[in-house]
Image (cartoon, coloured by chain):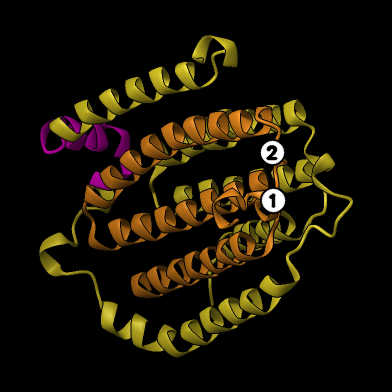
Chain colours: A yellow, B orange
Amino acid sequence: MPDPLFVFFAALTLGGAALLVASRHPVTSAMGMILALLGIAAEFFLLDAYFLGVLQVLVYAGAVMVLFLFIIMLIDAPAAGGAYPWRRAGLGLGALALLGAGALLLAAEPSLARAAGPTPPELAATPEALATSAKAFGRTLWTKYTLPLQLAGLLLLAALVGVVSLSKAPRAAE
Amino acid sequence: MESTLLAHHLGLAGLVFALGLVGVLVRRNLLVTYMCLELMLAAAMLALVAFSRHNGTMDGQALVFFVITVAAAEVAVGLALIVALQRRGGAVSSDRLDALGD
């Protein structure tokens, strides 16, 4: 019997995702996306990844989704149609993908639980270490992953420069 | 107990990923398509965190940190591209982006 909290937040996530896919209006879609991301952040908390949960809420559900909403308002997306927002030819493909994923899950779930097995003994003793996760997380980032961390900073800088040059007025670009 | 925790979270991640895939295939609005892409990334992150918890190591979480960073940069650039596209007079619909197909 799964944890009731898990069930609640899983339902929240799936409901938000369904709203995102099915809604006619982009703003409603964005709201569904925020719901789904909050649900996933809550699942991070249930998995003892507290720092990542906070990061998910701040960066994803906060900054990224505000950016999305801002752009939706900016370019007046409903003008994209009056046309039915779903691609009819894609509906079959979509149903196929969902069915395939469902069948795969049903087939894989028991064997997955078995194959995953108990936690390997040499790794088993760390829930406490994970519970003070921000500290352990920072230590991992700054020892094993120092170079990727610096590269991530460089990537953010490159994205910043790229966005500025992309969004300059068209006249300046010519 | 622990392995059912892993299996449940992997199942949820798979379902969310499938929903995102359906959205990418089915929706016309570029912004909604883009949000569905982000949803697929989030599902992958959930799977990574579940495995990280299962194995009791931090590596999966570190990878998720980098995924969040890259996704944030990607959203910024992608939205700027969509705005530039719209400024050039294109609609924000993937059906109308057929300039290369003519």
Amino acid type, mark 2: Gly
Q: Which residues are magenta?
A: A129-146
Give the numbered dot on residue B90: 2
Q: Is residue A53 left or right of residue A95?
A: left
Residue B96: image tag: 1
Dot 1 amino acid type: Arg
**Circles 2 and 1 in contact, beta carbons < 8 Å:** yes
Is A162 positioned to the left or the right of B58 in the image? Answer: right
Asked if residue A32 is positioned above or below residue A104 in the image, the reply reads above
Q: Is residue A145 magenta?
A: yes
Give how far across and how far down residue A19 sits, in percent. Answer: 74, 56
> Which residue is more in the foreground, A141 or A46?
A141
The residue at the point 52 percent across, 79 percent down is A101
Disc number for residue A83 = none
Which is nearer the eye, A91 or A151? A91
Are there few (<14), some (14-19), or many (20+) residues within 10 Å of tag 2?
A: some
Secondary structure under the numbered disc 2 in the rendered image: loop
